[in-house]
Amino acid sequence: MRHWYPHLCVVTALSQAAFNAARMLVSYRALGLGADGVALGVIAALFSLLPLVVAVHVGRAVDNGHPAGMLRAGVLLTAASLIVIALSGDLVVLGIGNALLGFGQILVVVAAQGFIPLLSEPYELDKRFAGWSLAVSIGQTVGLPVAGLVSSASSAEAEGVATTGAVLALAGLVALAAPSSLLLPVPRRVNGKAPSQEPTQSVLTMLGIRGMCPAVFSSLVVLTSMDVLSAFLPVLGEEYGFSVLLVTVLLMLRTGSSIVSRAFLPALLRVVSRRWLLLSATLCSALPMSLLPLAHQPVLMGILLVIVGFFWGIGQPLTMTWVVTLVSQRSRASALSLRLTGNRLGQVLVPLGAGAIAGSAGVASVFVVTGALLWTSSGFTWRAVRRERDA
C-alpha cells in the first residue's frame, strides 16, 4: 500500500489532461455545430449537472471504503464519454456526452481526493493535497498541447476546427490511466487502524460548521472561473482572430503557472500565513480576470493568465485541507464531495449565466462578471479567516 500515492497522481494527471482539454474541444465542436452563446453555456453547464446530484453520494461511498471502485468506474466512464463526444453530430448528442464526461470526472475526483485523508496522517494533508493538485495542473497542461496539436493538424485538411481526432487522442490518454487505477489499494484500514465507527455528519451539519460555507464558496468561484476561462476564451479568441494553437498556448500559460504555485506551496506556507494565501486565491485574481477582454495582444493576455493561474493554483489545495479539518474523520470524503457539489452548482449556474450574458452583452462581459465574483468571494474568505484568527 506504500506506493499508492504515485499511482494516484498518475491517474489524476492523465484523467485531468482529458477533462481540461475536452472542455476546450467541446466549445469548438459546439461552435462548429452552430451553437450560439446561450447554447454554449447550456452545453458547458451539462458537464456539472449529474455531479451536482451525485457528488455527496459518491463521497459517502468513498467514506464507507470504496474509493478504488469509484475511481475505476470513473476512468471507464470518462473514456466512454469521450468517444460519445467524438462521434457526436448534433448539439444534443454533444450535450449528452459532456454530461457523461462530468459524471466520470466527479467519480475520479471525489475518489482520488478521498484516498488522501483516508491514507494520510494529519500533518501530511497540505503536502499531499498540494502534490495531488500539482498532478492536476501537470495533466491539464499536458492535455492542452495534445488536443491543440492534433486538432491543428486535422484542421489543416478540413474547413473550420476539426475536433474528432483530438477527442479520441484524449480517450487514449485516459486508457493509459487504467493500469494505475487497478494498482490502487482497496483500503481496509486507515493509517494502520480500523475505520472509525463514529456516525457520519449530515450535509446540513457540515454546512452549519463555521468556515465551511466560505470555504465551499471560495472553491466554487475559483473552479467556475477556470471553467468560464476554458469555455469562453476560445470564443474571445475567435473574435480577436486568434488561432486554435494560440488559444491553446494561452490556456497552457494559466495551467503552467498553477504548476509553479502548487510546486512551491509547501515552501510558501512556511513564510506566508495560510489565511493570506487563502485570501490571495480570489482577491489577487479578480482584476486580471476582468482585464482579459481589454488585452487584445496575446503577450499581455498571457501575462494576465499567468497571474490568474498562479493564485488559482494556491487556492484549490488549501480549501481541500480547510474543509477536511472542519469535519470528523468519518466524514472527510463527504466534506470534500460537499465542496465539489458547491463547485458543480457553480459550474451549472455560472455557465448558464455567462452564456446569457454573452448572448446579450457580448463575451467580454463574461470575464468582467467573473472577476466581480472572485472579488466578492475574497470578502467572505477574509471574514472567515479573521474569525478563525480571533477565535
Image (cartoon, grey):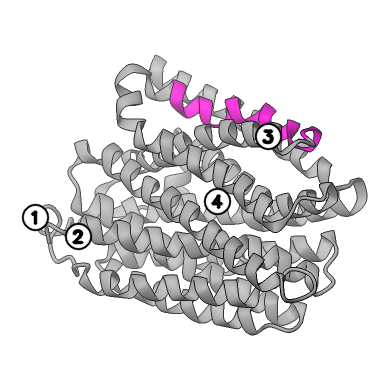
Report the magenta stretch's main SS: helix
Residue reaching furthest to the left: 192
The circle drawn on residue 299 is: 3
Residue found 75% across the figure and 65% down from its top:
42
Which image quadrant: the N terminus?
bottom left
Residue found 24% across the figure and 67% down from its top:
65
Residue 48 visible in the snapshot: no
- Which residue is label 1 attached to? 193
- Which residue is label 4 attached to? 342
Query: Of the residues under marks 2 and 4, which one precedes in the sequence?
Result: 2
Percent from the top left, x then y, of residue 186?
Answer: 19, 70
Q: CA distance from mark 1 to mark 2?
A: 17 Å
On screen, residue 249 above or below 77 = above
Tell me if mark 4 has few (under 14), some (14-19) or many (20+) residues whose alpha carbon lies within 10 angstroms of its own. many
Which amino acid does the dot numbered 3 rest on?
A: Val
User: Which of labels 3 and 4 is toward the front?
Assistant: 3
Percent from the top left, x then y, of residue 79?
Answer: 47, 77
Q: CA distance from mark 2 to mark 3?
A: 41 Å
- Magenta region, residue range: 276-295
Which amino acid does the dot numbered 4 rest on?
A: Gly
Question: Residue 171 colored magenta?
Answer: no
Question: Residue 287 colored magenta?
Answer: yes
Which amino acid does the dot numbered 1 rest on?
A: Lys
User: Which of labels 2 and 3 is toward the front?
Assistant: 3
Judge by depth and name the residue closer to the eye, 175 or 75.
175
User: Which of labels 2 and 4 is toward the front?
Assistant: 2
Residue found 49% across the figure and 51% down from its top:
141
Cβ atoms under marks 2 and 3 closer than 8 Å: no
Cβ atoms under marks 1 and 2 closer than 8 Å: no
